[in-house]
Amino acid sequence: MDIAALKRDLDGLKIEDNEKIVQQKSRDFYWYSPVLKRQLDTVSGDLIVSPKNEAEVVRVLAACHRHGVPVTPRGTGTGNYGQAMPLSGGVVLSLADMNEVTSISPGRVVCGPGAIIADIDKATRAHSGQELRLHPSTYNTASIGGFIAGGSGGVGSINFGGLRDFGNVLRLRVVTMEAEPRVLDLTGEDLHKVTHAYGTNGIITEVEMPLTASYDWVDVIVGFDSFMGAARYGNALGCQDGLLTKLITPIAAPVPQNYFKRHQRFFRPGQSICLVMVAPHSLDAFLAFTRREGGEVVFNTAAMTDEEKKGLPPAFELAWNHTTLRALRVDPSITYLQSLYPFPNQLALVEEMDAMFPGEVFSHLEFVRFDGNITCFGLPLVKFTTEERLEEIIRLFQDNGCPIFNPHRYTLEEGGMKQTDQVQLAFKREADPHGLLNPGKMIAWENPEYDYRSGRTYLFKGLEKVG
Ligand SMILES: Cc1cc2nc3c(=O)[nH]c(=O)nc-3n(C[C@H](O)[C@H](O)[C@H](O)COP(=O)(O)OP(=O)(O)OC[C@H]3O[C@@H](n4cnc5c(N)ncnc54)[C@H](O)[C@@H]3O)c2cc1C
């Protein structure tokens, strides 16, 4: 790679080549996984380029294509599969400066890929009392482009499902990695080419997302004597058609007591909890339902003064992957898994898996709407001992009918459905014929013969030495 020649071609653009800063900006939250930490700790790009607009993105991609330099896009680097890490070095393309909210209308917002999700909501709320349908728990730090290219769902998925569902992304503008980069507007079926593709087949330069009515969501925490009490309540609450909630998160004791430092005074020892975000107009009916189901309301922001709420993070920052983050801050030996408990057996599966690893795996569920039904994902916390034991736990989940989306792998396929996504692959052939976008993340491109059933971990060339 002739980085010096590339830099000359990029004259006038915002470039950072200070080694320390480049390494810092070459990382994401990969260290959540002890496996990825071992494999990716030394990964770094050669320089950071921060385009201000689409024309500059086109210029960077054309120059990198000319010099054969890989490009790994980056929003704000909060992904936790090592997705934004440049395995072959080269350019880290930071989209953070392309953060403008350009238009808001009934049901839609158009913005740059680098817009922080909370900032989009701030603008749409002020404009017309609307907000995004769903967001990751990294609402306050993550970019919308990174969410679309690397995320899956989150707060709001109880009503709207995930990003993969038709209608949850309206339009994407994408720049291809060719001698003369093309700018494409993708809608409908075509969106599946680039959503959750880790930026391996195009750079998103503009997004159009659907909006829904916004509310001053009330955070409520409901306590139960048993984890299954919290899980059954969460399931029943999700099935209440008349109650508007945005988050339903059962978490097993002693996770709240041990790791939710700022909330722990609200919980009795041994109490499992369900975190809920509920719309203000649903609150009375929600409290009546909760009483009927035998839940104990231990925390309710609608009944608290500003003084009492001071210093407490919002409920969603205890949920989704923030549960793991809070546990990791207290106990660095904690890691996690991501599983699905398929409908209609979700509660039986939850009960079975919850009982299987006492003192080693701690249940954490997120109720979602999935293909029209209410079911739950799991983000169980795991007390890490060895990689072999972690693999065994994964196998036991899978053998019992709970698919694992493995957060200890950096490739699209191993972190997802363990099969080639033909739509993404075909688009990569067209949009990135030299394989320069985020190399190493799509096995189907690097090694079409790879056998996903082998049980081995795919290792990208250059990372093979770390094993
Ligand atoms: C504490 C914590 C909680 C989390 N909670 C959730 C959650 O609830 N739901 C969820 O889905 N995820 C969650 N995540 C993962 C992550 O925060 C989100 O997916 C987030 O939206 C990623 O945005 P980002 O800007 O940080 O993206 P990055 O990490 O910078 O990038 C993510 C991926 O997208 C690619 N990319 C970035 N920008 C572009 C672009 N413009 N064009 C093409 N490709 C691009 C990158 O190359 C990378 O592969 C969580 C992570 C942490 C650490």
Image (cartoon, rainbow, N blue to C red):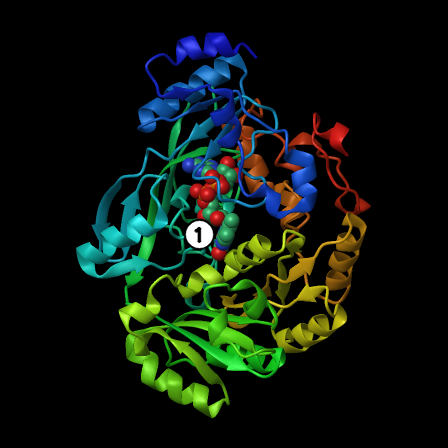
Residue 427: percent from the left, percent from the top? Answer: 53, 35
**355 to the left or right of 413:** right
Q: How many marks?
A: 1
Task: Answer above or below: position of 62 versus 30.
Answer: above
Residue, disc 1? 138
**Residue sitting at x 68%, y 76%:** 351
In the rendered image, residue 410, in percent from the top left (x then y), is placed at: 63, 41
- 109 relative to 193, above or below: below
Screen quadrant of the C terminus: top right
Report the residue at 60% width, 47% height from top: 32
x and y percentages locating residue 300 in the rendered image: 37, 76
300 and 241: which is toward the camera: 300
Q: Is residue 230 visible?
A: yes
Is residue 420 shown to the viewer in this render? no
Q: Residue at x 53, y 78 (%)?
A: 235
Which residue type does callout 1 highlight?
Answer: Thr
x, y percentage for residue 438? 55, 31
Could you tell me which secondary element the residue under label 1 belongs to?
loop
Residue at the left extreme? 127
Q: Is mark 1 within 8 Å of ligand 1?
A: yes
User: In the picture shown, does residue 39 fall above or below 267?
Assistant: above
Q: Is residue 370 left or right of residue 420?
A: left
